[in-house]
Amino acid sequence: MDEIQNYSYFEHGADVGITGKGETLEKSFEAAAVAMFMIITDISKVKPVKRIKFNFIEQDIEFAFISWLNNLLNESHLLNMVFSRFHVERDKDAWICEAFGEPWRNGLERGTEVKGATLTKLSVTNENGLWIASCVVDV
Amino acid sequence: MNLENFIQIEPNCWAVRPKEGGEGAGREAVMPPVRFYADKELLAAMDEKVREQIINVSRLPGLKGYAFAMPDAHWGYGFPIGGVAAFDPEEGGIISAGGVGFDISCGIRCLKTDLTIEDVSPYAEKLSDLLFRDIPAGVGAGGNITLNEAELDDIMLNGAHYAVEKGYGTKEDILYIEDGGKVSGADPSMVSTSAKRRQKSEMGTLGSGNHYLEVQVVKRIFDENTARVFGLKKNQIVISIHCGSRGLGHQVGTDYLITLAKAAAKYGINLPDRELACAPINSVEGGMYLGAMNAAINIALCNRQMLAHLTREAFKRIFPEAAIKTLFDVSHNTCKAEKHTVNGEELLLYVHRKGATRAFGPYHPSLPDLFKEAGQPVIIGGSMGTGSYVLAGTKESEERSFSSASHGAGRAMSRNQALKLWRGREVVDELKEKGIIIRSRSMRGIAEEAPDAYKNVDAVAEATEKARLAKRVCYLSPVICVKG
């Protein structure tokens, strides 16, 4: 599946709801990351020239979902980068994560800063074989 | 909001009508301990989610009195934005990360100048450019102030005092910052390494979203005596800086969200919404969050102090003799330990204000001498095109809302809806025709923050006064807005 077509937004009064869908749990996480970074900038303009990696341990798949998003935000701030490609692998409770992008530069659209992924409307479900991961992000 | 679900108990105060059969299986039909302060129109315009969220808040352990929704309340995460609730640690009361939010101690620094609109108007474009150049704003905009770990620890303990000691502002500023420029109880060891690293180059930055620096003119005075005490008069230029604790605060919120959600389960707290992630105040996890949250509050106080200094420096390039003093600095995303009298008994309570401003009335012991008789300045921030209000805290708000009032206009629609209705460039051009200069790196952000995406700030300020939470002092009209 093309991950670009597998994210969407849902209404929230003050912030933004994001949804990622995928054939696997990991793909749904990756699609949701695309949704989140599309709030920050037009990621079609972001060159995936630098790779960052991080891992974390989490038993609960819903908490793992927001940990994934919040770790990405953290790395983005620490390195002053934006990301456009994402990859997640799961080994039981261990989540092995990668993102590809580049440092902020002129020419990249300045969208809206995302402060964090919240537990509001948080859900990770499998509906008829399709994984759907959603939450509200605070902007 | 369906008004049939409410009982009007005063012209601007509403209780929630109990549901037949209760608010859930097995519950009796009791009236939830909730109060809404709003006029009929504001209440009707609120999302149904606000009612649901504030009822959820009222069910958390150790609530004292009522959970309140302010006139600007709107759908938040966990707590509604514009939500206030106080918890008693002696009765198992909780502290909630969702009751504070990610932007810990987001607030407004209001500066008053001795300039008039006539002084500034000829230089407005030049001043806009200088402010836009010197105040780092927007996503991805790092600051020019880089700190090492020891300096960050110092700030987490000493707040705005650190900034003043380093030459960012004056000792007089400190007098007019909530809590005297720093809160006690901060514990930098409870702040993660990631959070500290995020802040190293974010001090002295405005951020994004609804954050702004606005040059405003006092357009209308409602209360001459209090305005005189505050040092405000018609046509005077004031400056409002709206921002918070930046990356460190966001990361503290992130770090503790799951910790407190798991703690709630550990302590047998049944969360009606997981975003209300909380722990008993007197628990290990509650204490850890308190220490980290207070450290983040001090970061915010220092950040606004540094931004106030940068603003003064920019002004002085055009107006070298201008006197620019702090009117007041108020936070509106906090949990603070405060003494309040409930049923004749003075208690130490932990008051969560999520998108709500502390509003101490006259003679409150924590107020500086200047405000003893007038009450604390309360600032209701507007949107780019619709102005802001300065109000004064009332004695009555002590028992009506644990001394709390509105914080802003409050969103009337989602960001997605706003993006469908407006283009950033069009908003900038329309505001320019009205004499308001906008500077921003993000046209998307401008569209999301279009003035009509917010409620009518006039109605919010009026309802705040009619509900006796704070009284209007003056109305500020925007001249320049540097938008994050």
Image (cartoon, coloured by chain):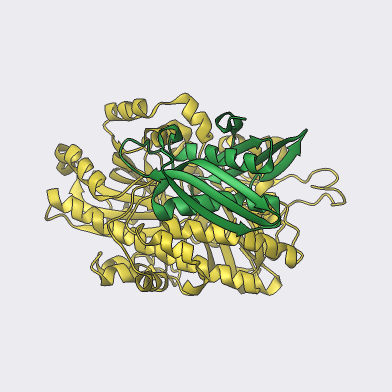
Chain colours: A green, B yellow
- The percent coordinates of residue B297 (x first, y second) are 45, 64
Tell me the residue at 32%/57% (across/down): B204
- Residue B119 placement, left or right of A10: left
Answer with the quarter of the image where residue B21 lies. Answer: top right
Q: Residue at x 32, y 40 (%)?
A: B477
Against B377, residue B216 (above or below) is above
**Is residue B198 visible from the viewing direction of this image?**
yes
Left or right, B455 with reference to B349 = left
Q: Nearer the viewer, residue A93 or B112?
A: A93
Horizontal and vertical percent position of residue B65:
66, 61
**What x and y, as percent, mark residue B128?**
23, 41
Q: Position of residue B147 (x, y in %)?
A: 33, 66
Q: Which residue is at the front of the view, B451 or A80?
A: A80
Q: Nearer the viewer, residue A94 or B385?
A: A94
Quadrant of the image for the N terminus of chain B? top right
Q: Is residue A10 visible?
A: no
Quarter where residue B253 is shown: bottom right
Residue lying at 67% horizontally and 59% vertically, measured from the top left: B261
Q: Can you say whether B259 is above or below A8 in the image?
A: below
Number of callouts: 0
Horizontal side of B73 relative to A105 (left or right) equals right
**Quarter of the image where the C terminus of chain B is located:** top left
The answer to whether residue B459 is left or right of residue B87 is left
